[in-house]
Image: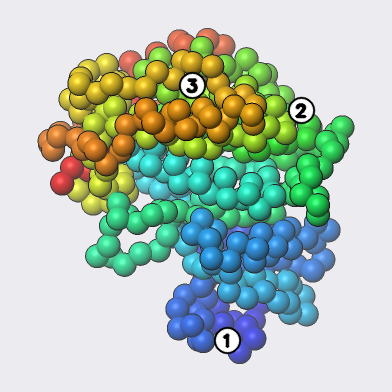
Amino acid sequence: MTQFLKNRWLLNKKIGEGSFGEIYQAYDSELQKNVAIKFEKKTEQRQTIKLDIAVIHQSKGSKYIPEFIYCGQTETHFFLVMELLGENLSQLRRKQKTSTFSLPTTIKLAIDMICGIEFVHSLGYIHRDIKPSNFAIKNIDSNESYSNLSPVLSIFDFGLSRKYIDSSGKMKPSRESVGFRGTARYASVASHEGKELGRKDDLISLFYCLIEFLYGKLMWSDIKDKQEILNLKTVFNSSKLPSELPHQFTTFFEYINSLKENDEPNYSYLKKLLINTYVSYGFAPNLKFDWEKNSVDYNLVSSFMASPYKNPNLSVFNFNSQFPNNPQNQNAFSQKFMNEVLDLKELYGQKTNEKRSNSNQEESPTKNQIADPKQYWKNQNQKSTSKCAMKCTIF
């Protein structure tokens, strides 16, 4: 690989690679800034970079997709020049003391992730490989705060994406068998079963990401065999979620599982579920993210059972009503909810200081624990009060 590309980009270092290509950080002499360049060999049987180029080029001006700069080819490679992003969410989570994100950080990230997924869907694509490493935070100056940035992250890597609408804007007919698509840990049951994927499947993968953010792992994280993972996911329903999760997360999971392949999800409903959770715990709108400085640890389980941040005077909207399962009543339901949901800016949490609790080393789940999900979560929570530590930043 030449160190100077097209007399414009000076390649600095490799920052990522996968089965289909490599990504380099480079200096753009024309724009006078660092950029990311993705390369893919012309000999690759599946030219995934063409999908990347199609989606990113079509997304010009979007805040949720890396900025398109240039695309071209050399004698041996196709390449795509785009905005250089920061660390991805998988890297950031693993850097935390407990390998988890706090509830406020998880919620704020989830809202941005939904916005990114919704935008991709609006272009007519299903991503089909939603996972933490395919979302990365924006690059900002060291004196800036991510709490003042919106959105915080971008979604990328569209190599496995598929257009679900045709040139006339109509839904493409479902294929009988398409094979597995995605990453086993985060893929939906439909993907494991080789079925055609819909927009709901991206959101199911997102939900698995959120559980991993809060607990550091999923019940099948240590399993490699896809059939074993499928067996666990098949019986994984809302009754097997951690008991201390806010009820809105349960509603979130039940709603996306109630959708059919071709249903259009009510993205606003999902985002407002998360906003309502954030507000009900009294988290300040301007809380910094866990990876920023001055963060304070507090315990997940105790915070859910008796949270010092929880405002007892809050009237939280009851989400146990019937889901908006079809397009006809989604808009009406969304408007009804909009009138009742609490505004995030109307409330901020009381400033406080919490002492850091020591984190214990996480152990892998045993087969018995996996066989009984409720017992698994219970055992995980009882190991240490810091096991499920959550962080928030208080100014």
Q: Which residue is identified by label 1?
A: 8
Q: Which residue is identified by label 2?
A: 193
Q: Which mark is residue 144?
A: none
Q: Position of residue 80 (x, y in %)?
A: 64, 70
Q: Determine the CA span between mark 1 and mark 2.
A: 46 Å
Can you tell which quarter of the image residue 324 is in?
Answer: top right
Can you tell which quarter of the image residue 51 is in?
Answer: bottom right
Q: Which residue is identified by label 3?
A: 251
Query: How many numbered marks does the figure carry?
Result: 3
Residue that protrudes farthest toward the right in the picture: 176
Q: Please state which of the two labelled residues, at mark 2 or mark 3, is closer to the viewer.
A: 3
Establish if 97 lies above or below 120.
Answer: above
Q: 10 Å neighbourhood of mark 2: few (<14), some, or many (≥20)?
A: some
Give amino acid for label 3. Answer: Thr
Dot 1 or dot 2, earlier in sequence: 1
Residue 185 seen by the camera: no
Q: Determine the CA span between mark 2 and mark 3.
A: 25 Å
The residue positioned 49% from the left and 16% from the top of the image is: 321
- The secondary element bearing badge 2 is classed as loop
Q: Position of residue 96 (x, y in %)?
A: 34, 42
Give amino acid for label 1. Answer: Arg
Is 86 or 55 nearer to us in this picture?
55
Establish if 363 lies above or below 80.
Answer: above
Q: 10 Å neighbourhood of mark 3: few (<14), some, or many (≥20)?
A: some
